[in-house]
Amino acid sequence: MVDFYDQQKIVLITLGIILLLSAVFIPAAVFYPAKVAFITPEAELVGTSFWSLVLGGGGMVLLAAALFIAALIEKPLTAWLLAGATAAIGFVAIALSLGDYYYMTSERFTYNPPLSLVSSTYTWDEFERVEERLHQQDGASAIESVAYYFYDGSVLEFSGGRIFEMHSSMVRRVETAGGVYTRIQSP
C-alpha cells in the first residue's frame, strides 16, 4: 500500500507534468484571450508581443519546477522554501506576461511594454509622426517595422505582431490629428 507521503509526491509530479505540457499552449490559448476580455470594451484591436507568450510559458515552467522541487527534495524545509521561491518567480513572470499588451480605441493608443506593469496612453494628437520601414520580399515591398514618434520625445518601435493589422487605422487617425506619415524603403 502507498502511504500519504508517496501519494503527495505523485500528485505534485502529476500536476507539474500537466503544467509543463500546458506551458506550450496556455499562454496563447488562455493568457492572450484573457487580455482581450479584460481590456476596455472600446478597444478595436488588442495586441501583445511574442515575448509576452514566451514569458508566460516560462512562468508556467517555473511553476512546474516548483512542484517537482517540492516532490523530489527530501528535506521538507529546504524543499518548500526553494519551491516557494521558484513559484514566486514563476508568478511574477506570468504577471509580467499578462501585463504586456497594446490596443487602440477611437480616441487613443495604449501600450504596456514587456517587463513592465505601467502603461502609457497617447491620444492621436500626441503623435508627431509615423515611420514605416519597408524591405523587398519576393519582388514586392513588405513592412519590416513601424515606429511611432510622439511630441514628448517617446518612440515606440514594432517589428511584428498585431500592430501591423491596426497600423493603417492608426496612420489614418494620426494624419487626421495632424501627424506625419513617412514610408522608408530599405536599400
Image: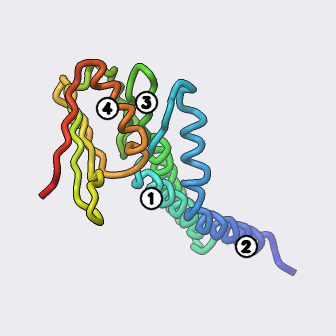
**Above or below for 163 versus 170:** below
Tell me where residue 85 appears, x and y as whole percent.
48, 56
The residue wearing badge 2 is 10
Give the SS element for disc 1: helix
The residues bearing labels 3 and 1 have C-alpha atoms spaced at a distance of 23 Å
Residues at marks 3 and 1 touching, judged by CB atoms closer than 8 Å: no
| Residue that mark 1 sits on | 54
Q: Earlier in the sequence, mark 2 or mark 3?
A: 2
Judge by depth and name the residue closer to the eye, 155 or 2: 155
In the displayed image of the protein, which residue is found farthest to the front?
139
Q: Is there a contact, CB below 8 Å, between mark 1 and mark 2?
A: no
Residue type, mark 4 in image: Val
Marking on residue 171: 4
Look at discs 4 and 2 and give the one toward the viewer: 4
Rendering coords of residue 22 (x, y %): 61, 63
> In percent of the image, x 16 and y 46: which residue is there?
184
Position of 146 compared to 16: left or right? left
Residue position marked by numbered label 3 in the rendering: 104
Of circles 4 and 1, the one toward us is 4
Task: Compute the Cα span from label 1 to label 2.
Answer: 28 Å
Q: Quick check: 8 left or right of 92?
A: right
Q: Which amino acid, by three-letter code, is at mark 2?
A: Ile
- For badge 3, the amino acid type reads Met
- Mark 2 or 3, closer to the camera: 3
Contact between labelled residues 3 and 2, with CB atoms less than 8 Å apart: no
Residue 79 in view: no
Is residue 105 visible in this depiction of the protein? Answer: yes
Is disc 3 surrounded by few (<14), some (14 to 19) or many (20+) residues within 10 Å?
many
